[in-house]
Image (cartoon, rainbow, N blue to C red):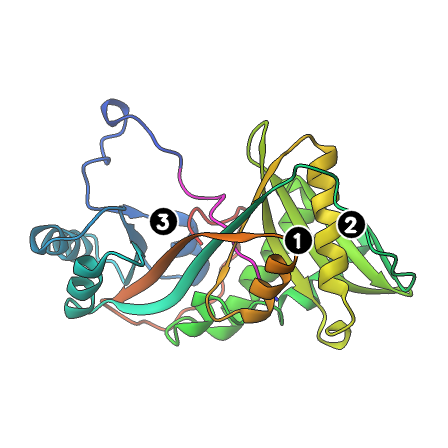
């Protein structure tokens, strides 16, 4: 089960202080270093033929290997133009949200213990993460190395445990780590669910439900009253999990990738997390 977010999107900077704000794309250093490719993201907005040409020209000048494009699902003109220009759809990005108007009641599950993560959990969480996010766009795009995709989410959950996320909750079945749930505080009122993963051997045992209930309880205790989550259109089990807890679809977007070059990627040492996922 996977739920990815865009908490890490680049901060908006006023045009007067950002010389690249007028550029059609943004270079993504983290993604580029991790995959050993030159990767960029087209700036949001509706594409027209001139804008599409500007994206292509910028990518060629900057020797970009892959450029990401995020489009509103109802923007037919941009979608048709992007596909004519060689962009390929790789994901349906769903944003769901719900209000927390009262404390979520935890259902008694004697066999499942949910607690904050500990340092000794990281190895088990990395193993779960390496096998839990195959619904995401990086796996779907065959141009990204599968082993690198596994390392991406292993690194993300490890960094989350070390303070990158506001909180990481861990579910245990007996003495076995069975899943994780990361929480991010956006501001005084809003929280966002980050990575959610359940071990293959623990699926079908309500571990995801226990983690979600405990996570919503954490948001409530922090005084946060609006919670959102991003997941994939192909990840139906995750959608049903959130819908059972009152989440409603807020936004539907489409991720596109366009490749200009496809060199073989290799592993790189990384220290931070990506600005665009």
Q: Earlier in the sequence, mark 3 or mark 2?
A: 3
Q: Which residue is mark 1?
A: 158
Q: CA distance from mark 1 to mark 2?
A: 10 Å
Q: Residues within 10 Å of mark 2 (few under 14, many from 20)?
A: many
Mark 2: secondary structure: loop
Per the rendered image, the range of residues in magenta is: 2-10
Quarter of the image where the C terminus is located: bottom left
Mark 3: secondary structure: loop
Can you give x and y, in whole percent of width and height, for residue 150 in the image? 56, 68
Q: In terms of secondary structure, what is the magenta stretch mainly?
A: loop
Answer with the quarter of the image where residue 53 lies. bottom left
Quarter of the image where the N terminus is located: bottom right
Q: CA distance from mark 3 to mark 2?
A: 30 Å
Q: Which residue is mark 2?
A: 117
Q: Earlier in the sequence, mark 1 or mark 3?
A: 3
Residue 28 got which mark? 3
Determine if the magenta segment contains residue 177: no
């Amino acid at each position: 089960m996977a739920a990815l977010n865009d908490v890490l999107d680049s901060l908006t900077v006023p045009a007067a202080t950002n010389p690249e704000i007028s550029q059609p794309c943004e270079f993504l250093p983290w993604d580029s270093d991790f995959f050993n490719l030159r990767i960029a993201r087209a700036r949001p907005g509706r594409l027209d033929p001139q804008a599409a040409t500007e994206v292509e020209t910028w990518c060629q000048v900057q020797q970009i290997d892959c450029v990401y494009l995020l489009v509103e699902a109802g923007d037919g003109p941009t979608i048709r133009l992007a596909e004519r220009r060689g962009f390929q759809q790789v994901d349906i990005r769903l944003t769901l949200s719900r209000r927390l108007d009262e404390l979520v009641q935890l259902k008694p599950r004697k066999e499942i213990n949910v607690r904050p993560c500990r340092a000794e959990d990281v190895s088990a969480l990395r193993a779960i993460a390496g096998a839990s996010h195959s619904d995401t766009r990086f796996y779907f795009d065959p141009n990204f190395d599968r082993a690198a995709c596994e390392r991406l989410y292993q690194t993300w959950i490890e960094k989350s445990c070390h303070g990158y996320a506001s909180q990481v909750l861990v579910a245990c079945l007996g003495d076995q780590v069975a899943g994780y749930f990361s929480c991010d505080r956006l501001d005084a009122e809003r929280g966002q669910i980050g990575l959610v993963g359940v071990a293959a051997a623990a699926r079908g045992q309500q571990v995801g439900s226990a983690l979600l209930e405990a996570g919503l309880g954490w948001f409530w205790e922090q005084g946060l009253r609006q919670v959102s989550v991003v997941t994939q259109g192909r990840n139906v089990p995750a959608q049903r999990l959130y819908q059972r807890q009152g989440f409603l679809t807020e936004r539907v977007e489409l991720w596109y990738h366009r490749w200009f070059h496809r060199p073989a990627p290799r592993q790189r040492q990384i220290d931070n997390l990506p600005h665009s996922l």
